Image (cartoon, coloured by chain):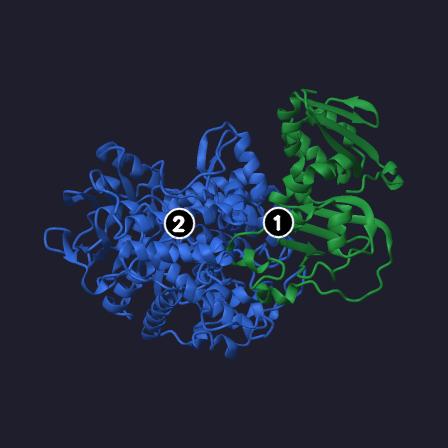
């Protein structure tokens, strides 16, 4: 995975969290709602997964359902990532509909009217903002890396998550907001997020209690 | 499993039981058994709550054995909701216990001569039927508690709640789980009302002293079972996704592709989906000391169920299924998981189908009886059903009845049964199954094994438009077959992708019965079951016009993809041409 911190991220308040490793998963729920990252665009989904998200062949094999702009993708080597794309990743899902939504699966015709088809529009290479959603097993697979590198999140989503888990974060969590310490185990401290539409969030694990 | 227990509820002096040889029904289990008996013995034009209808309860072919995932139980009869033949199946302990007791089916038949309510106790020594009017209108949890106090800890129960006694079209038949809670339901089609019409409140089963059913070839059976279990455990759906997150893992992905019916099937995305997703649910359960990985019956290795605790850490209900979270959640605009869990408990306790109830509440909200998103109003609606108020009687008879009563056009039913949690405009192939299944709109009707494993009807060209019809046909055939084995339908995921796991299943059946079960044999069984069911419905007055989705699915564009259901009627009519 590219270890980038583009300059664009610097225009947002930086919420830097260091937690015990066991608590990183508590932030995964943000990933299902969608976070934004600044990455190279104008490449195929396959390239993006490999080079921008750092997904190896085994991980890509696990990603059985890929939705680009809300549409199931069957061909990773033709679907293109654009500036503003929404990319959602899921492992294999149960049920007929779960099977239907698998990429290139035997049942893909059952949802043909919503399948992703590349329009052939020119896709300018460069950097852009991508919304990433990670579901189910993909959270633990790709989530820690994304959170460590940093993601742009909606402030109210982060505030809700911290408020609901204040008890959990009472111990084992160090937080800096633009280099100033914040006690997020106290719900009122989430006022620090007030007035901000989005914040740049990084979450890293520490082997010892923070 | 060489006998059928027939209970004549209209016998002089009260219900009388008689165990009879299995006869012509030998070799059948689950759905094949229920649909065979109903098809042969129930006049299709009879009243579903009358003397001529029968309630059939049948374990699967491998229930009561050491085989994994073999604990599904089928309930059949003429449906008070659809007017057609119905099979609804459930997990829980009863299938294993009933099979160990040697019964291939229990058949409730006749018409009670009085208003008295009865309980039935079955163990190795026989059958005892007792009048017990103290059970009248008790909810399921209370019924089970009384039975436990009376018969001890080794039992399992098959019961109905107040909705069944009041003969409502959404009434379920409840089955107790491993913790003896009535959390598992044969939910669809109102079969609880048929049990209620027979004045049977609860059937108590105790297999103490009965051995596990022995296979004809123990060594081969053990080997096949091991390969089968290995296949389930190594597959990412049955070995990882379902155990970690349960069936509600589908919420996020359905919402993402815009196929998640929201606000009574008005749109395909719900803003609150992440708050009620399987991922959130599992995390909440763990944080409250509950367990998101749990089986619904002994012998389950998938463990897709769990328990849900309230904010204080006390048990509230079992882990709500995807369909329940959707029906009471997104479809009603509700994103409060604690309220949804409460509704799940109330549905289980009163004995109401969660899909039908949630769809009904959404129709009631569309009618203006409450605002979308009003969780407390939704809870009150369920209490109305449980109490049997005038409003509750309407709601308890389903979405179709409620739509008629309050003048709503957007009522998502086929054959008067509410649609499950997948919009047929986004996933059109499932719309084919909703439309044509003999059961009414049913997400499990076309669920199982893929064409490229079974080759049902030959290879399907998925790129051809008619591929959707062919796939629906093949899936319905395969599902009917799986339902007849009594295997959990979730095995389908491993069988779908791993031919060796499908072979292991065939080998289990072959080793147990001393036969040579093949893929073709499974296909023939599925076709036979569907043919019987279609024939029953035809004789009950169903025509091709009943194999249709409501008109608005063809005209109302469904956001975000703005699609309508486009499969032609003439193509729907080809589904059962084989």
Count of marks overlaid on the render: 2
Using a 10 Å C-alpha cutoff, classify the residue at mark 1 as few (fewer than 14 neighbours), some (14 to 19) or many (20 or more): some
Numbered tag placed on residue A62 in the rendering: 1
* Residue placed furthest toward the bottom: B570
Whether the residues at callouts 1 and 2 have beta carbons within 8 Å, the answer is no
Q: x, y (%) of residue B188?
A: 40, 56
**What is the distance, in whole Å, between disc 1 and disc 2 at their CAs?**
38 Å
Q: Is residue B94 above or below residue B505?
A: above
* Residue placed furthest toward the left: B12
The residue that disc 2 covers is B352
Where, by quadrant of the figure, is residue B565 drawn?
Answer: bottom right
- Palette colour of chain B: blue
Look at 53% across and 54% down and name the residue there. B362
> In the rendered structure, the residue with mark 2 lies on which chain?
B
Q: x, y (%) of residue A23?
A: 64, 29
The C terminus of chain B sits in image quarter: bottom left
Confirm whether residue B425 shows in the render.
no
Q: x, y (%) of residue B476?
A: 44, 65
- Palette colour of chain A: green
Look at 62% across and 24% down and name the residue there. A167
Look at 27% across and 44% down and name the residue there. B97
């Amino acid at each position: 995975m590219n270890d980038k911190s583009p300059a664009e991220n610097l225009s947002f308040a930086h919420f830097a969290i260091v937690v015990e490793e066991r608590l990183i998963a508590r932030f995964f729920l943000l990933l299902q709602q969608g976070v934004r990252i600044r990455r190279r665009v104008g490449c195929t989904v396959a390239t993006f997964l490999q080079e921008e998200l750092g997904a190896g062949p085994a991980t890509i094999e696990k990603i059985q359902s890929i939705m680009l702009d809300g549409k199931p993708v069957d061909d990773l080597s033709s679907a293109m990532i654009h500036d503003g794309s929404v990319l959602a990743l899921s492992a294999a899902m149960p049920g007929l509909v779960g099977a239907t939504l698998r990429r290139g699966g035997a049942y893909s015709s059952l949802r043909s009217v919503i399948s992703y088809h590349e329009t052939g529009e020119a896709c300018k290479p460069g950097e852009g903002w991508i919304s990433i959603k990670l579901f189910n097993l993909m959270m633990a697979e790709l989530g820690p890396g994304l959170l460590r590198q940093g993601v742009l999140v909606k402030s109210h989503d982060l505030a809700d998550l911290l408020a609901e888990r204040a008890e959990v974060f009472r111990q084992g969590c160090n937080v800096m907001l633009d280099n100033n310490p914040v006690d997020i185990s106290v719900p009122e401290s989430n006022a620090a997020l007030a007035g901000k539409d989005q914040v740049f969030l990084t979450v890293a694990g520490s082997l010892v209690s923070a | 499993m060489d006998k059928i227990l027939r209970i004549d509820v209209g016998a002089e002096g009260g219900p009388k039981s008689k165990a009879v040889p299995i006869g012509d029904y030998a070799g059948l289990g689950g759905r094949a058994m229920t649909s065979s008996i109903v098809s042969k013995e129930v006049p299709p034009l009879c009243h579903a709550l009358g003397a001529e209808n029968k309630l059939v309860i049948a374990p699967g072919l491998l229930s009561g054995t050491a085989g994994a995932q073999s604990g599904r139980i089928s309930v059949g009869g003429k449906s008070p909701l659809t007017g057609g033949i119905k099979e609804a199946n459930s997990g829980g302990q009863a299938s294993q216990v009933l099979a160990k007791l040697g019964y291939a089916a229990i058949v409730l038949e006749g018409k009670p001569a009085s208003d008295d309510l009865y309980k039935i106790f079955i163990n190795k020594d026989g059958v005892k039927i007792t009048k017990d009017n103290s059970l009248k209108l008790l909810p399921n949890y209370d019924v089970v508690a009384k039975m436990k106090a009376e018969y001890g800890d080794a039992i399992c129960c098959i019961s109905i709640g107040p909705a069944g006694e009041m003969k409502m079209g959404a009434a379920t038949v409840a089955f107790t789980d491993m913790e003896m809670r009535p959390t598992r339901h044969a939910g669809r089609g109102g079969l609880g009302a048929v049990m209620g019409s027979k004045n049977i409140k609860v059937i108590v089963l105790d297999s103490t002293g009965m051995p596990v059913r022995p296979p004809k070839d123990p060594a081969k059976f053990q080997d096949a079972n091991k390969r089968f279990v290995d296949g389930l455990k190594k597959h990412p759906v049955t070995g990882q996704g379902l155990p970690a997150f349960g069936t509600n893992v589908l919420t996020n992905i359905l919402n993402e592709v815009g196929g998640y019916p929201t606000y009574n099937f008005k749109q395909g995305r719900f803003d609150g989906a992440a708050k009620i997703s399987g991922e959130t649910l599992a995390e909440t359960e763990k944080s409250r000391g509950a367990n998101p990985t749990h089986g619904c019956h002994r012998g389950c290795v998938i463990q897709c169920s769990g328990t849900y605790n309230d904010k204080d850490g006390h048990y509230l209900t079992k882990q709500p299924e995807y369909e329940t979270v959707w029906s009471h959640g997104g479809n009603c605009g509700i994103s409060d998981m604690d309220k949804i869990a409460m509704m799940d408990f109330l549905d289980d306790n009163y004995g109401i189908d969660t899909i039908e109830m949630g769809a009904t509440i959404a129709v009631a909200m569309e009618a203006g009886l409450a605002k979308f998103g009003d969780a407390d109003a939704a809870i009150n609606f369920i209490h109305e059903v449980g109490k049997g108020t005038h409003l509750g009687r309407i709601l308890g008879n389903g979405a179709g009845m409620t739509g008629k009563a309050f003048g709503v056009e957007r009522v998502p039913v086929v054959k008067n049964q509410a649609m499950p949690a997948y919009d047929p405009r986004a996933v059109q192939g499932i719309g084919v199954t909703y439309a044509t299944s003999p059961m009414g709109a049913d997400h499990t009707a076309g669920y199982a094994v893929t064409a490229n494993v079974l080759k049902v009807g030959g290879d399907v060209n998925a790129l051809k438009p008619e591929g959707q019809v062919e796939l629906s046909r093949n899936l319905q055939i395969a599902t009917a077959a799986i339902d007849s084995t009594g295997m959990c339908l979730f095995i389908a995921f491993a069988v779908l992708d791993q031919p060796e796991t499908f072979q292991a299943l065939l080998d289990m059946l072959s080793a147990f019965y001393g036969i040579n079960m093949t893929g073709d044999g499974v296909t023939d069984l599925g076709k036979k079951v569907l043919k019987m069911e279609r024939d029953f419905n035809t004789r009950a007055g169903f025509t091709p016009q009943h194999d249709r989705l409501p008109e608005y699915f063809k005209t109302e564009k469904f956001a975000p993809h703005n699609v309508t259901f486009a499969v032609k009627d003439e193509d729907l009519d080809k589904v059962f041409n084989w």
